[in-house]
């Protein structure tokens, strides 16, 4: 049996406020909470596994050592990087930029709700 391909998932952890509904104006717009651990466990990880990828997320790493060095290593060697840009998370944006600098291919961008309009990613296809 062939070895499973490796997928690194760059996404927020825990429960965070999601993007506000652009249809609701003013301070009455309340951002819904998103449980990103649940999104990973119920959607992203099973989808990757069904495509025969071994899914890995940085907060699941139990090794000792320098987290930045480990993150660079993962972004370099991963066959695929899934980046969840549902909310503006600086760590996810940074990891996506590092991946783009290291390898030109093998990135899937996920956007829950609104789609990012960042100039450098505007033409990239995204999963919603």
Image (cartoon, grey):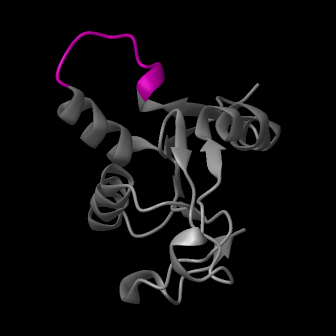
Q: Residue at x 59, y 70 (%)?
A: 28
Instruction: Estimate the x, y position of residue 72 in percent, counting from the top left.
Output: 26, 42
In reply to whether residue 13 is colored magenta, the answer given is no
Between 98 and 39, which is closer to the camera in this rendering?
39
Q: Is residue 11 left or right of residue 47?
A: left
Q: Is residue 34 left or right of residue 79?
A: right
Q: Is residue 66 left or right of residue 60?
A: left
When asked about the image quadrant of residue 54, the answer is top right
When asked about the image quadrant of residue 35, the answer is top right
**In terms of secondary structure, what is the magenta stretch mainly?**
loop
Instruction: Estimate the x, y position of residue 89 in percent, counting from the top left.
Output: 38, 55
Instruction: Estimate the x, y position of residue 64 in percent, counting from the top left.
Output: 25, 10
Instruction: Estimate the x, y position of residue 122 in percent, counting from the top left.
Output: 49, 87
Q: Which residues are magenta?
A: 59-66
114 to 82, vertically: above or below: below
Q: Residue at x 51, y 72 (%)?
A: 27
Q: Residue at x 76, y 25 (%)?
A: 1
């Amino acid at each position: 049996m062939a070895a499973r391909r490796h997928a690194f998932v760059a996404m927020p952890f825990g429960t965070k406020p999601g993007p506000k509904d652009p249809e609701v104006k003013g301070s009455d717009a309340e951002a819904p909470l998103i449980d990103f651990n649940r999104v990973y466990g119920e959607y992203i990880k099973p989808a990757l596994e069904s495509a025969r990828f071994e899914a890995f997320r940085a907060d699941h790493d139990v090794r000792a050592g320098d987290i930045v060095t480990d993150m660079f290593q993962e972004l370099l060697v991963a066959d695929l990087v899934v980046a969840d840009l549902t909310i503006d998370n600086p760590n996810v944006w940074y990891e996506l930029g590092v991946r783009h600098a290291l390898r030109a291919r093998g990135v899937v961008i996920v956007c829950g709700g609104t789609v990012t309009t960042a100039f450098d990613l505007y033409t990239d296809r995204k999963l919603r």
